[in-house]
Image: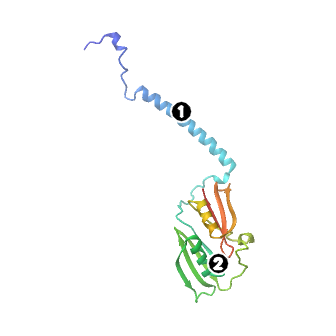
Amino acid sequence: MKIHRRAVATLPPRPNRCGAADKRSRFAWGIALRWVQCWLTLFGAAALAQNPDAMPVKDAPVWITQGTFFALYVADAQKISEWYVRNLGFRVNYSAELPRSPDMAKAVMLEHDGSFIEILQPRQPTGDVSVDRPRYNDQRLGVAKVGFVVRDLATLEADLTKRGIAFNHRSVNSSATKLRTFAIRDPEGNTIQFFGR
């Protein structure tokens, strides 16, 4: 078939295997990706300069949180367990007197949505306990307070307010976690802090 020379100019260019348009597109994407990598490197370096502890640790163990666990020494295990059940929705998984233990009189395990609290009552508890005296203020070595991250912080705070729970502080912004937080205390002065958006 004979094609006139003037008509050849009007025909679309015959694509090669890669195609010129593909080459230009890949080149543009390559430039864009290099810019993104450059900016991420700069911002990452700036963030690490402000907070060097944020640098990931090599060979750190990989684990995914599915709940929490903590234990409290209390003067009255029955009273404290009932408070957590009534006000925070925990349920009793296990409760036992410990007649053979030289140190512990009673143990109760509470559970709520994958989080566990072990309530331990020593035979000879020491220290003053009172809802009016937050143990967090004692600055004793060991666990200072415990906490939970929740889905609806405002609703929980409103509910606990209606129940007359003692608050350490109302909702504030936490610069350390970038979340809002409030803290309450149980009848023996243990601080429980809640975080959420």
Quarter that holds the N terminus = top left
Query: Against 156, is 55 above or below?
Result: above
Query: In which quadrant of the rendered view does residue 190 lie?
Result: bottom right
Query: In which quadrant of the rendered view does residue 46 lie?
Result: top right
Pick out the residue farthest to the bottom. Answer: 99
Residue sitting nearer the eye, 46 or 126: 126
Instruction: Name which residue type carries label 1.
Output: Ile
Q: Residue at x 65, y 78 (%)?
A: 73
State the colouring used for the structure image: rainbow
Q: Which residue is mark 2?
A: 73
Q: Residue 139 appears at what percent x and percent y?
A: 74, 70
Answer left or right for 152 relative to 19: right
Which circle's residue, 2 or 1, is located before the other in the chain?
1
Circles 2 and 1, Cβ within 8 Å, touching? The answer is: no
Instruction: Name which residue type carries label 2.
Output: Tyr
User: Can residue 112 be seen from the camera position used here?
Assistant: yes
Quarter that holds the C terminus = bottom right
Q: Residue at x 59, y 61 (%)?
A: 155
The local crowd at label 1, few if under 14, some if 14 to 19, many if 20 or more residues have their Cα within 10 Å, is few
Pick out the residue farthest to the front. Answer: 162
Query: In which quadrant of the rendered view does residue 98 lie?
Result: bottom right
* Camera-nearest label, 2 or 1: 2
Q: Residue 72 appears at what percent x and percent y?
A: 63, 75
Q: Regarding mark 2 in the picture, which secondary structure is present there?
A: strand
Residue 31's label in the rendered image is 1
Total count of labels: 2
Residue 119's label in the rendered image is none
Q: Residue at x 57, y 79 (%)?
A: 108
The local crowd at label 2, few if under 14, some if 14 to 19, many if 20 or more residues have their Cα within 10 Å, is some
Measure the alpha-carbon separation of dots 2 and 1: 61 Å
Answer left or right for 192 relative to 20: right
